[in-house]
Image (spheres, rainbow, N blue to C red):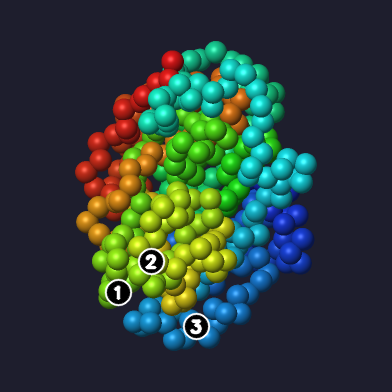
Amino acid sequence: MKGNDAHGAHEDAAAGGSAMRENGARPGAGNTGGRQDASAHTGGRAGAHTGGREDASARPAARTLRGGWRLGLVALAAAVALTAGVAVLPLPAEHGGADTVSAGSGTAAQAAAKAPACQEPERSLRPASADGATIAKIKARGKLIAGVDQNSFRWGYRNPASGKLEGFDIDIVKAIAKEVLGSEDAVIYRAIPTSQRIPLLQAGKIDIVVRTMTVNCDRIGKVAFSNAYFQAGQQVLAPKGSTITGYDDSLKGKKVCMAKGSTALDAMKADSHGALFNTPELLVPNQLDCLVRLQLGQVDAIVTDNALAASQAAQDPAVELKGTEPFTTEFYAVATNKEATDLVRRINKVLAAYGKGPWQESYRQWLSKDLRGLTGPPAPKFLD
């Protein structure tokens, strides 16, 4: 993609292209060529490229949407979700997938175990500027490989006018690249689904994940995390005219959608309030797929982070957050391979400076319209 290459920000094509070949799809007009994972346009025009595939189930449903929801929104969301589907980076079989946890000593995960009974999984290593093996590898490559979202409006999404990735999470990636490599454009972006964040870090296919990823006790045993850069919580998203009132018994018998590998799924497994959720059609690779199903009337509600839900409600005025406040407290952080302690410490150095001005600027630009009243990131908590 010559325009992006001129700015030094590369987007990986190798995996996206192979995924399309494996699925029998061909690149179309929506793909702009060059080094690019996929060309989904969140918040853009309807009829975006769908990777050569069409969701047959969406065609009749789109003509009979409940409550008169607009066809354009459905076409847009379906296009985004389907394009994101072909952007999945194939994980070689020898890496073992999500359950693989490599052994080692002196890891951030082991340090995390110092927190009594994992009461505060958001604790991280103290900031430092020394280079280690991970940073040396990144510098030798000359590029930071970042796993991001390209479908989450205002967090990580592709601007339909410029074709570039933008959002709150993307700004953090740029800050890390500038610290480590001297240029915010020295990045290879890889659009990855929710369910592949941990496997791709474990396999060494990406250096970092900055993708509204929550720190929790299970995950700190598999990957390492920076200090928290945002506080969020789970909440219900449903049509404005729905009888659903929040995360309560009004969910009984309702079809609720969420992403595989998400903390929303963990919450629902703990207490579903009688909702239907644990079936293949209700568990999707990317959270935006749930919005497509909601708009098509295939599900009744979504459970996801309130930060993501607020952005989706901004896109679609027919849906809203239910309940007065989130029913969990969660922290977003930058994830790395659990052996990359030098990178974790360097990222924490970046975040310490970032929280004193750039964080607020990015928040005002991307999130303040939907998530009002925030003044800065959570206070850092340290392991050592």
Within-10-Å neighbours for mark 2: few <14, some 14–19, many 20+: some
Sequence-wise, which precedes: disc 1 or disc 2? 1
Tell us which disc is closer to us: 3 or 2. 2
The kind of residue on which mark 1 rests is: Ser
Task: Please name the residue shown 48% across and 15% down the image.
Answer: 128
Sequence-wise, which precedes: disc 1 or disc 3? 3
Give the left or right position of residue 196, taking residue 299 as reference.
right
Sequence-wise, which precedes: disc 3 or disc 2? 3
Give the left or right position of residue 326, taking residue 82 as reference.
left
The kind of residue on which mark 2 rests is: Gly
- Kindly identify which residue carries mark 3: 61
In terms of depth relative to the viewer, which is nearer, 56 or 50?
56
Describe the element under mark 2 as helix, strand or loop: loop
- Label for residue 242? 1
Task: Please name the residue shown 43% across and 77% down the image.
Answer: 297
- Label for residue 274? 2
Give the left or right position of residue 26, taking residue 39 as reference.
right
102, above or below 370, in the image: above
Tell us which disc is closer to us: 1 or 3. 1
In terms of depth relative to the viewer, which is nearer, 245 or 170?
245
Within-10-Å neighbours for mark 1: few <14, some 14–19, many 20+: some
In the rendered image, the quadrant that contains the C terminus is top left
Task: Please name the residue shown 48% across and 71% down the image.
Answer: 293
